Image (cartoon, rainbow, N blue to C red):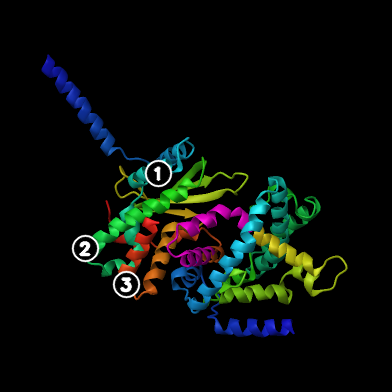
Amino acid sequence: MKFRKYFFSFLILMFSFYTVSSYSMAPDVFVQSTVNRASQILSSDISKEMKIEKLKIIAEETVDINGIGFYTLGSYRKTLDEEQKEKYKNIFKNYFLKSFSSRLAEYSNPEIQVNSKEKLNEKYTIVSSTLVATKDRPEVKIEWRIYTKNPSNPLIRDLIIEGLSLARTQKEEFASILNSNDGNILVLFDALEKFISN
Amino acid sequence: MLKKLSIILITTLTLTLNVNAGTDGQLLLSKNDPSKIEDCFEGLNRATFKLNQSLDGAIFKPLAKGYRLIPSPIRSGVSNSLDNLSNLVTIPNNLLQGDFKEAGINTGRFVVNTTLGILGIFDVASGLGFTEYVKEDYGQSLGAMGVGPGCYLVLPVLGPSTTRDVVGQLSNVVGGDAWYNVTVKNDTQYFKDSDYYISRGGTGIDFRAKNLSAIDNLEKNSVDFYASVKSLYLQDRQQKIANSDIIVDTQDDSDWEEIETQ
């Protein structure tokens, strides 16, 4: 009898794990839930430092930081050896988390409405949303480029604000540093490390 | 004298830029791809950018901050009337781009807002169901006609531009902007030169005030602020020239293709 009870409990547990891991989250639901989590933190009554730490956790879970990191290197990523790639991944992650979370932390209680989604192909869906206007700033259109290769774990790869891509801006910023230093990746590492330590 | 000089400049620059009429949307996108636009005078541009940053810190940012203290309805009124004036450049450019329907809508918008909206202070046209207003300028028209952007430039005070957009801006002072014509160019008894310069300055301060925290945020979080501003400006121009949400519609996936993280 006891064995039977354990057996059923085990089955239920296995079933729950299975359904959770195989659950395919719709990209628009994923965006809305991410936005809600961030909004909750931003409107909470905690210090700015604490908000930044909590936002970093959300970013690590929902953003494809490695993917964006290699995208922003452009053709230079092909010139890196394995050791440099590992180092870059590590530096970029720290840079991204600091930059992303401190940008977001400036907003207090942003209200974002998810409006629609457009599936580009199996790997990408664009989710359209609106940052609702306040008395200090106009309404802002935000598109989210969601990487959906693994539908149970969608990830953000880009934010397109009023038609301007953040990933593309980042890529061109890094290209500018690399181009003016003969493609020396160490100069980019230095610039990113300086930013992280500031 | 200024008129002659401007015409010579426009003709020379237009001839030196790669004119190619009859381009399709894809070619327009590719021609205006920010990563392909050369920064021919980067040293000078960076120096001018620094000068502009100093001017911004000393003049424009404090003015924008002060402007933000004005009650929101008054700021909306100022912003609306400046937008209304910009129709005088948008309408001829709608026509130049062959968009006669939009030219008609914008003419109606201008008439309604100038009269019922009391010199554009109230956006009555939007309330009446007019479509969302999209500004156009001579730089965009040249781009839509297939004129390449030329080099990236940073102008003192005015900020980021391209060779083509400078030519476009010059068109305003050689008769292309009716507001300039009735204030500065012709000696009318109704308007003064200062009306034009105040409206231009007002447009700049209104833009700065609307983007106060966004620009500060960008500066604080950039490793190369100059490159970020350049990229954002050129992406914006690329999108405006194509008159569509091009980034969403056609952003090339090939750059992402080989990055597999899942």
Mark 3 highlights which residue?
A184
Magenta segment: B207-236
- Tell me if mark 2 has few (under 14), some (14-19) or many (20+) residues whose alpha carbon lies within 10 angstroms of its own: few
Secondary structure under the numbered disc 2 in the rendered image: helix
Chain bearing tag 3 is: A
Q: Earlier in the sequence, mark 2 or mark 1?
A: 1
Mark 2 highlights which residue?
A83
- Which residue shows up at 71% across the image and 72% down it? B176
Task: Indicate whether residue B230 is drawn in magenta.
Answer: yes
Structural distance between the alpha carbons of marks 3 and 2: 15 Å
Q: Is residue B139 left or right of residue A168?
A: right
Q: Is residue B186 above or below residue B213?
A: below
What kind of residue is marked 1? Leu
What kind of residue is marked 2? Glu
Q: Earlier in the sequence, mark 3 or mark 1?
A: 1
Q: Earlier in the sequence, mark 3 or mark 2?
A: 2
- Tell me if mark 3 has few (under 14), some (14-19) or many (20+) residues whose alpha carbon lies within 10 angstroms of its own: few
Q: Is residue B118 above or below residue B251?
A: above
Structural distance between the alpha carbons of marks 2 and 1: 29 Å
Image x and y of residue B7, in percent: 68, 83
Structural distance between the alpha carbons of marks 3 and 1: 32 Å
What kind of residue is marked 3? Asn
Q: Is residue B33 left or right of residue B134?
A: left
Secondary structure under the numbered disc 3 in the rendered image: loop
Q: In this rendered view, identify the residue nearer to me: A24 or B49.
A: B49
Quadrant assignment, res A75: bottom left
